[in-house]
Image (spheres, coloured by chain):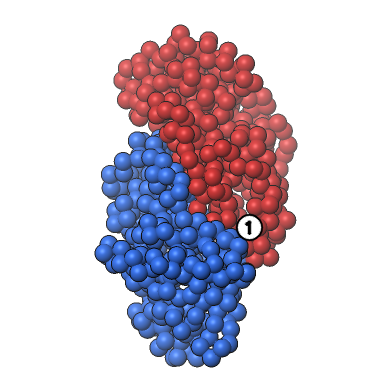
Chain colours: A blue, B red
């Protein structure tokens, strides 16, 4: 099957485009009329670096690639709009697997209101995905960047931590357990991100590199310090067991593991309750207050006994 | 060097952002306020598929990746806005080469008024680039799609053909000659695309797959037929010599070669002269009338003696 036929088969399987999209797949470019301001982010996932083909079915890989990209939009507090997908196909990946992969992506697109508006298909030595996502907001001030946190703000977290790292340990050991779903199927917190933005979040980031590293990014961008209480960190179910079985500290998985794709947000302390209620009403995950914003710089991760954990991030190129 | 340090070094080298960009590199997403409608396109380039590292310096590879993506915006007749870049770095490509590559891209970005507004850096088995470009126009009707050509329209072409295919032959033979520049440094015809749009182009496409294949796409999208006279096709300098030296037909290189990244446009016959004059005034390349739009379907490529060439395209996956 050639590129043109594959593209044509892909196009026929896509759900109908969203309201901003005037011309979708099939021309030189997709044409949209954004309703106000846009947020754009791009993420690449490669076999052997970000996933392994033997651990996932093609649909799961497609789903994860879009989820990871959408997580950045969740962290800006905006509505998902369009996605543009590069698919690099190795010689041992057949036509059916390509279409399955796109189906997995299209399913998450439909769930999140994202239009798959364009892309490029090429040969590649390993399965390669690059997803560019565009989110929309009516006004510029609807976006929540990393840079607005103020001393006195509360620090809240969506969902649970450590599951992705624990899942990775299980996958590497060819074992099974519930954290595997987190590693293979991260969920972009779009509902939570918008609710936090509406509740007055002053800064927000998604946890792709790990809580410690991403908290450091938020602190540096906002020009403030962060204090995180490890006693407050919500561990995903099964993480403690996986860590115990492998002689690892569950806190290490929660703080440095990466890929949990939860949101870390700063917001005025008197808004936390309202934010949690709004997230709950909309079917979102739980919100946990894990610390606070302080004057100064850097991230202090405090252990119950008075000790400190070093805030290390997960770094792709190391 | 880790991902974070490389990203920081990249950021410091980028030219200042354009007027649409409110928040650029460094947050979860770039934020823009598009002035009207946007055109978005994505292109991937991989070592061994779309270029070879031994044929180019890193700056040239970066330049080509952006040029190929911008060519799609040229074919919509819009102004270049932002670019988002995925850079997949193999283990044998050093930090300096990565920065050189970005410098080459940034140079073309500056020349074309494009803002490098975001990206992602990851490990990869071979040097991998994916570039998403966003173009802007005040109104929806300013875009020229592939779909508007009408019987009676003239068919015009920017610049010259066959150079990229001839350059590839030279590179494969490790020879030298002027068509090599076309293969290694395609020029996106942004000035020409906007001038053609303003002159009333009814349909437009850029020649990435080859004149025959891309003309077929335009004909199918517009629901009309195209008649192209090979006698009118402008061959790039040196193409005839390269073809002769290798026992190839220069017309084959011009019609089926691909990667020339010239624009093929349909427009009312009485507008051709004005369009050519406008392109010339703005320092663009020459415009050649190479045929016409006819009722019916398909592409007829007519030889001077009365014969026909089959319109074949270049297909990435074959």
The image position of residue B179, as x and y in percent, is: 66, 32
- Along the line of sight, which residue is nearer the eye, B41 or B177? B41
* Residue in the image at 36% along x and 81% along y: A237
Above or below: residue B5 compared with residue A237: above
Above or below, B309 relative to A120: above
Q: Position of residue A75 (x, y in %)?
A: 45, 59
Q: Is residue A224 visible?
A: yes
Nearer the observer, A102 or B224: A102
Q: Which residue is more in the foreground, B11 or B260?
A: B11
Chain of the residue where label 1 is placed in the rendered structure: B
Furthest residue in direction top, as rendered? B270
Please name whichever residue, B139 or A201, is drawn nearer the observer in this view of the structure.
A201
- Note whether B130 is above or below A270 in the view shown: above
Count the labels in the image.
1
Is disc 1 surrounded by few (<14), some (14 to 19) or many (20+) residues within 10 Å? some
Q: Residue at horizontal 69%, vertical 49%?
A: B13
Q: Quadrant of residue A108?
A: bottom left
The image position of residue B161, as x and y in percent, is: 57, 26
- Percent across and percent down for residue A196 are 39, 61
Residue at left offset 67%, top offset 24% = B237
Q: Can residue B101 be seen from the camera position used here? A: no
Mark 1 lies on a secondary structure that is helix
Quadrant containing the C terminus of chain A in the rendered view: bottom right
Q: Residue at 46% across / 46% down in the picture?
A: A140
Residue position for label 1: B7
């Amino acid at each position: 099957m050639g590129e043109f036929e594959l593209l044509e088969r892909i196009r026929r399987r896509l759900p109908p485009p969203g309201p901003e999209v005037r011309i979708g797949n099939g021309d030189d470019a997709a044409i949209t009329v954004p309703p106000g301001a846009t947020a754009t982010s791009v993420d690449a996932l490669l076999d052997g670096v970000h996933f392994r083909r033997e651990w996932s079915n093609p649909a799961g890989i497609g789903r994860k690639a879009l989820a990871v990209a959408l997580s950045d939009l969740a962290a800006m507090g905006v509505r998902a709009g369009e996605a543009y997908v590069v698919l690099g196909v190795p010689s041992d990946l057949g036509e059916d697997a390509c279409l399955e992969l796109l189906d997995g992506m299209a399913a998450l697109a439909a769930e999140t209101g994202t239009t798959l508006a364009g892309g490029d298909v090429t040969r590649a030595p390993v399965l390669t995905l690059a997803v560019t996502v565009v989110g929309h907001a009516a006004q510029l001030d609807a976006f929540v960047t990393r840079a607005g946190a103020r001393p006195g703000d509360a620090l809240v977290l969506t969902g649970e931590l450590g599951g992705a790292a624990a899942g990775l340990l299980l996958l590497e050991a060819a074992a099974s357990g519930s954290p595997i779903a987190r590693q293979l199927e991260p969920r972009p917190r779009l509902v939570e991100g918008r609710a936090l933005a509406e509740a007055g979040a002053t800064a927000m980031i998604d946890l792709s590199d790990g809580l410690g590293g991403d908290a450091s990014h938020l602190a540096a961008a906002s020009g403030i310090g962060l204090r995180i209480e490890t006693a407050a960190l919500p561990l995903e179910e099964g993480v403690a067991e996986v860590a115990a079985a492998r002689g690892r500290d569950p806190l290490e998985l929660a703080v440095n593991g990466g890929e949990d794709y939860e949101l870390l947000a700063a917001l005025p302390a008197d808004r936390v309750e309202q934010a949690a209620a709004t997230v709950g009403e909309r079917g979102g995950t739980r919100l946990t207050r894990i610390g606070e914003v302080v004057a100064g710089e850097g991230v202090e991760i405090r252990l119950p006994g008075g000790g400190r954990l070093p805030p290390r991030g997960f770094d792709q190129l190391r």
